[in-house]
Image (spheres, rainbow, N blue to C red):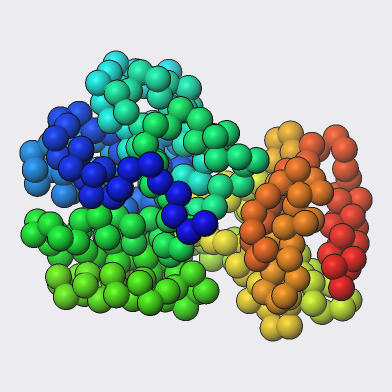
Amino acid sequence: MDKIYNIKLKEIFNNLIKSNNIIITGHQNIDCDCAASGLALYLLLKKYNKNVSIINFSIKPKYTNSIPHIDKIQFLDDENNFDKNILKDAILVILDAGEMPRVGYINKYTDLCKDVYFIDHHKNKMATKEIALKNVNKYYIDEKASATSQIIAQMLLDEKEVDTEISTLLYAGIASDTGGFIYSNTTAETLIVSSKLLDIGCDLNAVVATIRRKYDENDIKAHKYIFDSIIVCEDKRVAYIYSENKIEGTPINQLSISLVETVMQIDGVEIGFVIRKEESSYRISLRSRGLKDIVSIASKYNGGGHPKAAGFEVPLEKYTKENLINEIYNDIKNLY
Ligand SMILES: [Mn+2]
């Protein structure tokens, strides 16, 4: 099933244009696609003089600083500061979220909204669509779309109000989720949509500035630490990093780094994993570059994901660092 929907894209757009109270949100720990698709929709609805706001219900990740118009997004990580009255009669548009729990505490208050629209390109990880989309009444999920920005582009492309800023955001969102149009989620449709965005006047210099990460002093320190911490296992096919939640004193989410991506760049490594020690649990991210499907490992620990990227969490008291590393390494060896 490529598309799962109970409302067409154009119909969603027409309903938004008719409404005057719209709140756009997305998944916690926002990424480029989530922010760009939301901001593009936000800017377009502003052109129609709609009363629209864009809110993320978690903290602002540092690497989002380079996204144009990121200052338009309100980051409301503290539930105590959230005024639920704004949800009254509002249409809540949820983008790029995978499943409802990933939107954060707003998930508890969706019944206050007039309508909840869910637009996404992820295969949800939950047992059934009904659980994943609890509290959602209108949904449009295109699992073949490379990015939510691609879906929003398909929704908006006929509008003459789409300008350089909007097309630049959408192109950046697509380029980010496709690794610059080279990941296997890139389709002919991705390129057709993106070529139309270029035609409209998308600014490629701005796209590069948006998706290329910039490093400050803390990031450099963190990189030194990371390269020193990488362990390549004896078979050379597996490598991992064990890390605390802070690196050199800086919380990981305030660093412009991806530990697991760094591991996967080692020549010969087919499967990589990162263990992050948090307050009460270990969080494990797994990646596979070869043919081995790592989702079975994540599932063993009640986690999820897809064949090439998966993750799970285990309680701190259940494992020592050494036990956990050994167990995961053995799980990986069993795949071969
Ligand atoms: Mn996405």
Foreground residue among 152 and 322 = 152
Q: Position of residue 254 (x, y in %)?
A: 50, 50
Q: Which image quadrant is residue 112 in?
A: top left
In the depicted structure, whether residue 25 falls above or below residue 285: above
Foreground residue among 332 and 81 = 332
Residue drawn 75% across the image and 52% down it: 298
- Report if residue 217 is visible in the image: yes
In the depicted structure, whether residue 72 falls above or below residue 137: below
Residue drawn 38% across the image and 77% down it: 188
| Label tally | 0
- Quarter holding the C terminus is bottom right
- Report if residue 179 is visible in the image: no
Q: Is residue 37 left or right of residue 57?
A: left
Q: Position of residue 291 (x, y in %)?
A: 72, 75
Q: Is residue 250 left or right of residue 157?
A: right
Residue drawn 87% across the image and 38% down it: 318
Residue drawn 84% across the image and 65% down it: 332
Q: Which image quadrant is residue 117 in?
A: top left
In the depicted structure, whether residue 236 falls above or below residue 32: below
Q: Which image quadrant is residue 20 in?
A: top left
Q: Position of residue 21 (x, y in %)?
A: 20, 29
Q: Position of residue 129 (x, y in %)?
A: 55, 40
Foreground residue among 107 and 75 = 107
